[in-house]
Amino acid sequence: MSEPLSTYNNVPLNVWAVTINRKVTREEFETCLNYVDHKARVKAEKSSSRGDGFRELHPGTVAFTTRTSTGHVIAKLLPSLVVWNEHPNIHASQWNHNKTKAGKEYMDSAEVNKVLGYETACGVSLVIMAWAYGPKLHVINIGIDIMQLSLPKAMNARTFADAYSHKITKSEQVFLDAKLKDEVILRRLCILITIKAAYIKALGQPPGFDYSRVECNIPEETVTVDGNPLHGWEFRLFKVNLGVVRNGLLLEEAYQCATAIFRGGNTVIIWEESPKDMEKWLHFITTDVILANLPRKHSQNSSASGSNSGTQSTSAAGSGSGPASSGQQQRAQTSAP
């Protein structure tokens, strides 16, 4: 196992994994929209007005059926949930959503001297956010990416990997040897792509960034960019397994995840950690927990401007932690490919 060297940046990096454990109703979805920025709200409302993603379940009951749209709104909510819980006595209106010149999003407030740096990623049933809270220079360059460890129907791993050939270097192709089993090729491909995507997102680069400029030598645990060694970065690799109930059946979804944060010093790739250690930074939450906390937090923030006493942090995130999801199984592991 690689260990981070002593660097100037040792702020804790946290990961929240939100399991989309059920469909949300239109009322619940619109409640969530009250907490996201104007751009995200307008986009979601346009989809709603067209009827996209909604269907009638029973007379007078409508459920939002597009998990992707639900996930993106939840992803927009998560940064606010962090700062509300870190500072429950600061009114929600006193927090600002900002961007750097490179486009990296962060939240700050004139009431505190720290900044929330973060990045999110969405899967079919998983919304995940990496975040750190501290001096702006230490938390702004954070990235995360996920890929579901599942092949499209009627496609083998080799064909699937070929679809990503424009993002893979010649040296990395050796790592994806066609003689390997499908599950090994798929996992290795997902490791390569998520490391690259997490790094690119941490820099604030646009989606069109050329992935092949970044090369990962997984056996040697090194990363180069444009042929030059990459210095100062910490990459954390882990796998999340979800037990998702669909139509009364318990199905498993597995995701390869990678985080990136600039720390200074040598670049390291962290592979293996015990479950007990992972509990310190990886926390599972369900959509039910988020929905249950929103009204309470809204009420707290509404009263906070008049009084700084009598408010309590919700259970969703005290000091970076989050409650284990109920009604849905999940576990995480880190292991070499």
Image (cartoon, rainbow, N blue to C red):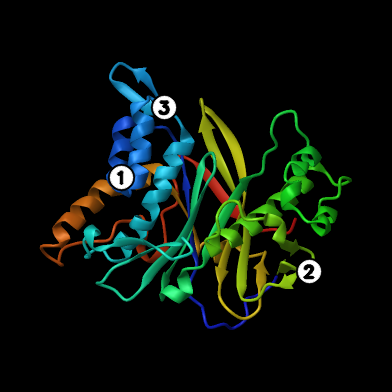
List x then y, in percent, for residue 100.
43, 65
At numbered mark 1, what does the secondary structure look like: helix, strand or loop? helix
Task: Judge depth for marks 2 and 1 and give the one in front.
Answer: 2
List x then y, in percent, for residue 91.
21, 61
Mark closest to the chain's N terminus, 1 or 3:
3
List x then y, in percent, for residue 165.
76, 47
| Residue type (three-letter) at the residue carrying disc 1 | Ala
Q: CA distance from mark 1 to mark 3?
A: 25 Å
Q: Look at the image and tell me in which quarter the C terminus lies.
A: bottom right
Residue 333 in view here: no
Task: Judge depth for marks 1 and 3 and give the one in front.
Answer: 3
Q: Would you identify the image quadrant in which residue 40 lies?
A: top left
Q: CA distance from mark 2 to mark 1?
A: 45 Å
Q: Which mark is residue 52?
A: 3
Q: Look at the image and tell me in which quarter the N terminus lies.
A: bottom right
Q: Which mark is residue 292?
A: 1
At numbered mark 2, what does the secondary structure look like: helix, strand or loop? loop
List x then y, in percent, for residue 219.
79, 64
Q: Which residue is mark 2?
A: 220
| Residue type (three-letter) at the residue carrying disc 3 | Asp
Residue closest to the eye, 60 or 278: 60
Residue 146 in view here: yes
| Residue type (three-letter) at the residue carrying disc 2 | Glu
Considering only vertical position in the picture, is 163 above or below 211? above
85 displayed left or right of 218:
left
- The crowd level at tag 3 (other Cα within 10 Å; few <14, some 14-19, many 20+) is some
